[in-house]
Amino acid sequence: KPVQFVSHPLYDNFGDIIGKPVARKKLGLDENDFIILFFGFIRKYKGLDILLDTIPAVVKKIPNTKFLIAGEYYEDRKPYEDQIRQLAIHDHLVLCTDFIPDSEVKNYFSAADMVVQPYRSATQSGVTPLAYHFEVPMVVTNVGGLAAMVPDGRVGLVAEPHADAVAEKIIEMHASGPQNFIKAIQEE
């Protein structure tokens, strides 16, 4: 039967990009930190635990990294809190785990150097079009339709869905300069 692919539309209803220094000031973030954003509801399939496992390797290579976790828990938070304690990574986290109002979304994306979607499974994700709208490069996992929406090496990097691979791609993006992906994001 005939099939038509319809990708997730871009979101442009969350406001315009604001300057990184302004966004970071609103969120109480250091202007000199490398900010990695995990955005959206916290559910097992979205792989926050995978991202937490990347932190020791990432901060070993990029010490001034902060992981900005912005989204509401939609499951028990205790396993994540236990993991944070066991890995001793709290100093590298900024946890904003309450509901994020629409009027505040622009602050999180405008403050970020990159977005990470370490999903275990997905069809598509609304986070990807948000990253496009706010011109933030992405590291996504090679699951479902995520990689199709994020051409590898062009607007972001694609990793396999495990901590070592995600950490490697975060470090690679930092080394190559996230700002070098912005022109391709605008074109895409």
Image: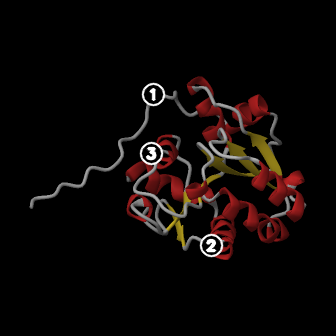
Q: Which residue is mark 2?
A: 162
Q: Residues within 10 Å of mark 1 (few under 14, many from 20)?
A: few
Q: At which x and y percent is residue 56? A: 82, 68
Q: Could you say which is closer to the camera, residue 93 or residue 27?
A: 93
Q: Is residue 18 visible?
A: no
Question: In the rendered image of this protein, does residue 3 appear above or below residue 175?
Answer: above
Q: Could you say which is closer to the camera, residue 48 or residue 138?
A: 48
Q: Which residue is mark 1?
A: 13
- The amino acid type found where label 3 is placed reads Pro
Q: Which residue is mark 3?
A: 129
Q: Are marks 2 and 3 in contact (CB under 8 Å)?
A: no
- The amino acid type found where label 2 is placed reads His
- The amino acid type found where label 1 is placed reads Asn
Quadrant of the image occupied by residue 53: bottom right
**Relative side of 148 to 177, left or right:** left
**Residue drawn at the location 65% of the way across and 31% of the way down:** 99
**Residue drawn at the location 45% of the way across and 28% of the way down:** 13
Of labels 2 and 3, the one closer to you: 2
Question: In the rendered image of this protein, does residue 5 appear above or below residue 72?
Answer: below
